[in-house]
Amino acid sequence: MSPVPPDQGLVRPSAVVDAEIRALLQETGGWLWGPTRERYEELRDEWVQAVRAEVTTAA
């Protein structure tokens, strides 16, 4: 998987992205295949970027 590109705009808060990940998992019953898996991976990468931004801001 390619690395996440550098921040190119506003980053959503990690809590918002986390809620979207949880909703996706609930909707699919935890089964992630095809486009659903791709969406999960995009959200996961966005969540990591958001957490990093929040940690950097807090420091």
Image (cartoon, grey):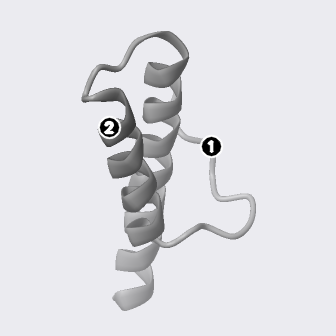
Instruction: Assess disc 2: are there few (<14), some (14-19) or many (≥20) residues with their C-alpha within 10 Å of its C-alpha.
Output: some
Residue 54 is situated, as x and y percent measured from the top left of the image, at 41, 77
Against 13, is 27 above or below?
above
What amino acid does circle 1 point to?
Pro
The label on residue 38 is: none
* Front of the two marks 1 and 2: 2
Against 32, is 48 above or below?
below
Q: Residue at x 52, y 31 (%)?
A: 39
The label on residue 5 is: 1
Report the number of numbered marks: 2
Instruction: Assess disc 1: are there few (<14), some (14-19) or many (≥20) residues with their C-alpha within 10 Å of its C-alpha.
Output: few
Q: Nearer the viewer, residue 51 or 30?
A: 30
Against 56, is 21 above or below?
above
State the residue position of label 2.
Answer: 25
Q: Nearer the viewer, residue 29 or 51?
A: 29
Residue 10 is situated, as x and y percent measured from the top left of the image, at 69, 70
Outermost right residue: 9
Dividing the image into 4 quarters, which one contains the C terminus?
Answer: bottom left
Q: Secondary structure at mark 1?
A: loop
Q: In which image quadrant can residue 58 be found?
A: bottom left
Q: Nearer the viewer, residue 54 or 17?
A: 17
Q: Residue at x 25, y 28 (%)?
A: 30
Q: Residue at x 35, y 28 (%)?
A: 28
Disc 1/disc 2 C-alpha distance (Å): 25 Å
Q: Residue at x 41, y 40 (%)?
A: 24
Against 15, is 3 above or below?
above
Q: Secondary structure at mark 2?
A: helix
What amino acid does circle 2 point to?
Leu
In screen coordinates, is 19 left or right of 7? left
Residue 22 is situated, as x and y percent measured from the top left of the image, at 32, 50
**Would you say residue 1 is visible in this rendering?**
no
